[in-house]
Image (cartoon, rainbow, N blue to C red):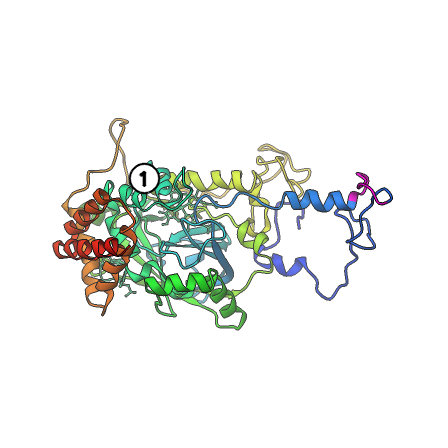
Amino acid sequence: LANGKGEGPAAYAYAESTYRYNEKPVYTTTSGCPVDDPKKYQRLANGPLLLQDFHLIDLLANFDRERIPERVVHAKGAGAYGEFELTHNISDITTIDMLTGPIGKKTPLLTRFSTVGGEKGSSDTARDPRGFATKFYTEEGNWDWVFNNTPVFFLRDPTNFPTFIHTQKRNPQTNLKDATAFWDYLVTHQESVHQLMTLFSDRGTPASFRKMHGYSGHAYKFSKPDGSFVYVQIHLKSDQGIATFNNEEAGAKNGENPDWLTQDLFDAIARGDNPSWTTYLQVMTPEQAEKFRYNVFDLTKVWPQSEFPLRPFGRMTLNRNVQNYFAEIEQAAFAPSNMVPGVEPSADLVLQSRMFSYADTHRHRLGGNFHQIPVNMPLHAFNPIVRDGLMNVNGNLGANPNYQSSYRPVTYKNTRPTVSHEQWTGQATWAIFDDVKDIDYEQPLGLWKVLGKQPGQQDNFVHNVAVHASGAKKDTREKVYEMFGRVDADLGKRLKEATEKEVAGK
Ligand code: NDP
Ligand code: HEM
């Protein structure tokens, strides 16, 4: 695995090498001692067990430690390997290694899809955003796109994330999902209404991970060595088209096979029906951002495609299933802070907080040396100052000095831009984002109109909200009608009628 220089195997090829099926291995304890029959245990005559039976203790002790913490969000997921192919020249806006060079240049990758709120064993068909996380093993480090299948998010103040997630998970007393808490948060934080419009359309219950889009959501910066930059939004559009369940189909599928989307992905790749996505950029200059109607750092807003057209640049294909789910998917650690030269975070406050949260949770979930787990290893990494720690398993850089030594030649590459257009001036303040205003209901109305052009989709939206909100207390329900009524008065009325009918029917 390790060659003492910090160069791991291409994590991409790891799984193939760990199991040689043509060999007939000898069964042993974890210390390698051959054992004749795994069923046998040592006991005194026909009495109790003997503690000296290491084989049994070895089995039980390892079994007792099989579980690791599940992801605090996005716990249920499925994934596969694949490759990214550069299809267009975009060197006018970027110097990122993966996105420059000959057309057709390929980069290996791993993608994991997930639901957000449910536990590790929960249903794939729950109404929820879907995570769409990809790790690209580029020549200049791992670049993670930790995206969702929705272009916006529920919040724009990072402090709201833990409280918001609590309301979408289980009630602390009953341990049940709690429709009142769910809606109580949302009606008191109405910047979430745009995300709700997507969540309660049929796109909130995708029928396949292969048949949904992915979005960066945040503005990222593509910067050049001279300090110039553009803001970008990244879109992944499914080449398979979109497929969704309606509310009742999603419920029925959950009963029939709660792992349906996981199975659909695995089976498709196993039969060679490899899913792909065309990747696009929306590009905005800093000058355009200053004049933009919406705050470019507001995660509850999209950039209208008529103003900022989609520019294609690549294709991403998933073509290989993992050999071992736990090793390669459960232990995969995606982080928005895994960036490569030429990409920078924008000042979106939610993105800024995500720059901390992911590697932090990985240290908790997988241990401090999580970056040594093969699936997380970059193609090339050398940092002699990062050493030791629990479960250091890659040779620990051998005899390399553990400081910046004048006796050990190391190459330093300057990849950080020195100048930046952005200049922040003023005092440190205690802040929250702007109060919710009329402007926050404009894009939700835009989506309501998009649904209006798709037969039956507005009706399904009303039905989907009604079924869910009918579980909430009366005064919370009233606030739900009021909130959607601010998007469109008729929508508010229709929701009230449909929801109260559901309540009466219960
Ligand atoms: P456009 O008419 O140019 O684009 C509409 C967008 O809506 C397309 O990307 C389309 O994706 C997507 N869409 C279609 N049906 C649904 C649905 N049921 N749920 C969610 N998205 C859907 O419009 P604008 O750019 O002016 O945006 C109008 C509204 O569309 C926005 O308010 C926003 O809510 C939504 N939207 C906008 C996106 C953007 O980046 N501008 C991205 C996604 C949604 P497709 O047809 O490819 O499946
Ligand atoms: C997973 C935090 C917002 C997409 C996670 C995890 C944490 C987290 C702690 C678990 C990671 C792990 O255990 O490996 C946060 C915080 C947010 C935030 C604090 C805001 C303040 C977002 C947004 C998006 C997003 C806006 C999408 C645009 C994802 C995805 C995963 C994830 C896709 C699953 C990654 C995987 O497959 O392993 N998030 N998140 N999150 N988050 Fe977020």
Q: Amino acid at mark 1?
A: Leu
Name the residue: 31% across, 42% down. 181
Residue range of the region highlighted in magenta in the rendering:
46-54
- In this picture, residue 63 sits left or right of residue 299: right
Query: What secondary structure is marked by label 1?
Result: helix
Seen from the viewer's position, the closer of residues 138 and 60 is 60
User: Can residue 422 be seen here?
Assistant: yes
- Residue 447, located in which quarter of the rendered image? bottom left
**Image-quadrant location for residue 169:** top left
Who is closer to the viewer here, 426 or 227? 426
Could you say where residue 17 lies in the image, as x and y percent from the top left? Answer: 66, 59
Q: Is residue 374 left or right of residue 128?
A: right
Residue identifier under label 1:
349
* Residue 176 to residue 237: above or below: above
Can you give x and y, in whole percent of width and height, for residue 282 in the image?
A: 29, 57
In this orientation, which residue lies closer to the viewer: 363 or 11? 363
View extreme (right): residue: 45
Q: Which corner quadrant of the image does residue 67 belong to?
A: top right
Q: Residue at x 12, y 54 (%)?
A: 489
Q: Residue at x 68, y 40 (%)?
A: 398
Q: Residue furthest left?
A: 489
Looking at the magenta stretch, what is its main secondary structure? loop
Q: How many residues crowd around disc 1 within 10 Å: few (fewer than 14), some, or many (20 or more)?
A: some
| 398 in magenta | no
- Is residue 2 toward the left or the right of residue 123 in the image? right
Q: Where does residue 504 sit, x and y in percent of width and height?
A: 23, 54
